[in-house]
Image (cartoon, rainbow, N blue to C red):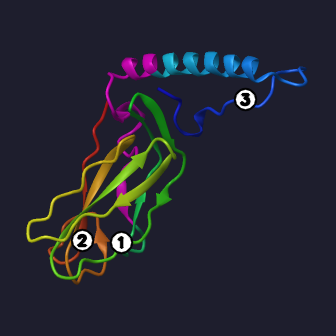
Amino acid sequence: MAIQGPSYRKTQWVFEERPVSSAKLNQWDDRIEAALEMVFLLIAEAWGGGDGVLRNLGPGALVVEATAPVGLGVTVSPGYAFIGGYPYRLLESTPTALVEAPAVNGRVDLVQADVATWSVSIKTGVEAASPVAPTVDSDSLALATLVLRPGMVSIKDVDDGVNGYIEDVRVFV
C-alpha cells in the first residue's frame, strides 16, 4: 500500500546532511509513509470505514450539478471523501470536460473522483437501447451518472424528458 494523491510527497533531502545517502533517505520516507498510512486508516475507521463522501461536512459535498448556464458539462462541488482507505479532497468547484451527445441510442456516463490524481473525470459509457453505467475505475469513487439522450442540447439537474440529466450515486460514510 502506498500513499496516494498529493497529500504526501516523499522528501528529497535530510536536514543539514550533505550528501544524503539513499539508504538513509529511503528509511526516513518509509517510516513517514507507514505512519501516514496508519493515520489514514484510523481516520477512515473513525468515519465508519469504507469508501464514500464524508456526510457530516455538508449535504453538498462532491455533488454533481449542471453548469450555469446549462450546457453539455457538469460541475463537481468541493468536498472530502475516503477512497480505498485514503483521504480525498476537492478544494473548489471543478467543471468537467464537455460531454458529446449520443448519436443513435441513449448512453449513461459516470462522473468519478480519482484519489491517485485528486481529480474528477467522466467515464464514457456505451450507446445501447438499454444503456448501463460503466464500472468505476480502481482508486476512484462514483459521484453521479449522466443519463444522455440522442439529440440533447444540455445536461440538467432533473429529467425534463428531452435532455440529459444527472443521477446522484454518492455513497456516504
Which labelled disc corresponds to residue 11?
Answer: 3
The image position of residue 155, as x and y in percent, is: 30, 71
- State left or right for residue 126 relative to residue 26: left
Front residue of 74 and 41: 41
**Residue at point 37%, 18% (across, down):** 45
The image position of residue 1, as x and y in percent, is: 46, 26
What amino acid type is highlighted by mark number 3?
Thr
Q: CA gap, disc 2 to disc 1?
A: 10 Å
Front residue of 130 and 62: 130
- State left or right for residue 172 relative to residue 133: right
**Residue at point 21%, 67% (across, down):** 126
Range drawn in magenta: 41-66
- Which residue in the protein does label 1 denote? 99
Quick one: label 1, few (<14), some, or many (20+) residues within 10 Å?
Answer: some
Q: CA gap, disc 2 to disc 3?
A: 46 Å
User: Along the polypeptide, which appears first: circle 2 or circle 3?
Assistant: 3
In this rendering, the answer to whether 157 lies above or below 88 is below
